[in-house]
Image (spheres, rainbow, N blue to C red):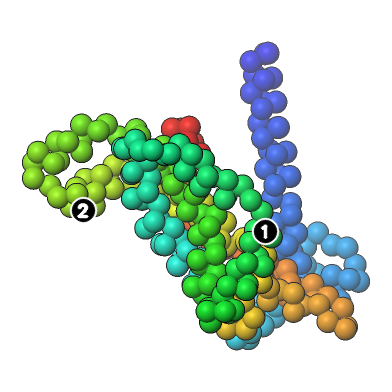
């Protein structure tokens, strides 16, 4: 009886926890299927008159759906750049000892600890001067300041878990470094690359301050576009809720595809 009670108690606690997490998402979906009149006029646990007009507006209005496209463009660019820079840097930190290596590694992490607001004004002035303001590459490069240190830290831990004898054996077998790194070493740390890509994607996707400060029209992200729901007539709650639901989808898809890599990262104790 005591063991059975503990099992049932654990199930109840887990069920309540999941319910607590899912209630806001359910309520967002619930609001997205209502009209503004129903949202403001009455309280209901589900839509009384289901409408998809809010989603139709977002998916047919260029000023709305271009926000998602802009966000995906600079997020993918940032993830690719961050991994391309972090992979050789993490390999150097994991395989070689050089003067100031620990200080340099710590300095990289301090960049990740700084709030984005500290760098908003310098980036704005710099990009305005060189003609990169309101471009996707501007936001992608700005996010590298935070994502590259994080990716280096994650990948360095995975690379340290790979024995150095593998490197030496590959060199003896006649492998050049690029061939060894791509064909042998990279597959061994595939889970680490997946974890690093996940965190780079998620930070760049949800970051608002830099992406909004460094864009105006051509590269405006969805987070900034959502402020358009505020007007003289009030807040367009239904459209805002629908935009929020669509904003969750890319992150959920990324989590689904890299879920096994994330689990391995936690198991190795590096995430």
- Residue labelled with disc 2: 178
- Residue labelled with disc 1: 118
Relative image position of residue 196 (x, y in whole percent): 45, 49
Name the residue located 81 percent from the left edge and 59 percent from the top edge.
Answer: 45
Name the residue located 67 percent from the left edge and 20 percent from the top edge.
Answer: 6
Name the residue located 43 percent from the left edge and 32 percent from the top edge.
Answer: 268
Point out which mark residue 212 bears: none
Q: Is residue 62 above or below residue 227?
A: below
Which of labels 2 and 1 is toward the front? 1
Relative image position of residue 94 (x, y in whole percent): 35, 38
State the SS at label 1: helix
Ranked by sequence position, the earlier of labels 2 and 1 is 1
Name the one closer to the observer, 73 or 240: 73
Q: CA distance from mark 2 to mark 1?
A: 37 Å
Name the residue located 13 percent from the left edge and 41 percent from the top edge.
Answer: 171
Label 1: how many residues lie within 10 Å, few (<14), some (14-19) or many (20+)?
A: few
Q: Is residue 103 left or right of residue 208?
A: left
Name the one closer to the observer, 119 or 173: 119
Q: Is residue 2 above or below residue 119?
A: above
């Amino acid at each position: 009886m005591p063991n059975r009670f503990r099992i049932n108690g654990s199930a109840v606690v887990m069920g309540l926890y999941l319910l607590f997490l899912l209630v806001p998402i359910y309520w967002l979906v619930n609001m997205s299927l209502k009209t503004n009149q129903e949202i403001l006029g009455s309280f209901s646990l589900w839509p009384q008159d289901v409408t998809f007009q809010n989603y139709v507006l977002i998916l047919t209005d260029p000023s709305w759906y271009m926000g998602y496209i802009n966000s995906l463009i600079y997020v993918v660019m940032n993830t690719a750049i961050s991994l391309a820079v972090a992979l050789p840097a993490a390999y150097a930190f994991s395989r070689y000892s050089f003067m100031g290596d620990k200080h340099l590694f710590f300095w990289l992490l301090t960049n990740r600890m700084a709030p984005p607001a500290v760098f908003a004004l310098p980036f704005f002035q710099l990009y305005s001067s060189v003609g990169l303001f309101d471009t996707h590459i501007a936001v992608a490069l700005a996010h590298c300041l935070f994502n590259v240190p994080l990716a280096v830290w994650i990948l360095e831990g995975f690379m340290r878990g790979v024995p150095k004898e593998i490197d030496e054996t590959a060199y003896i077998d006649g492998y050049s470094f690029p061939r060894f790194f791509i064909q042998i070493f990279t597959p061994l740390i595939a889970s680490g690359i997946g974890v690093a890509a996940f965190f780079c994607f998620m930070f760049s996707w949800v970051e608002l301050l830099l992406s909004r400060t460094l864009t105006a029209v051509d590269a405006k992200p969805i987070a900034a576009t959502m402020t358009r729901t505020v007007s003289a007539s009030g807040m367009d709650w239904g459209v805002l809720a629908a935009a929020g639901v669509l904003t969750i989808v890319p992150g959920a898809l990324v989590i689904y595809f890299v879920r096994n890599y994330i689990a391995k990262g936690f198991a190795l104790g590096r995430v």
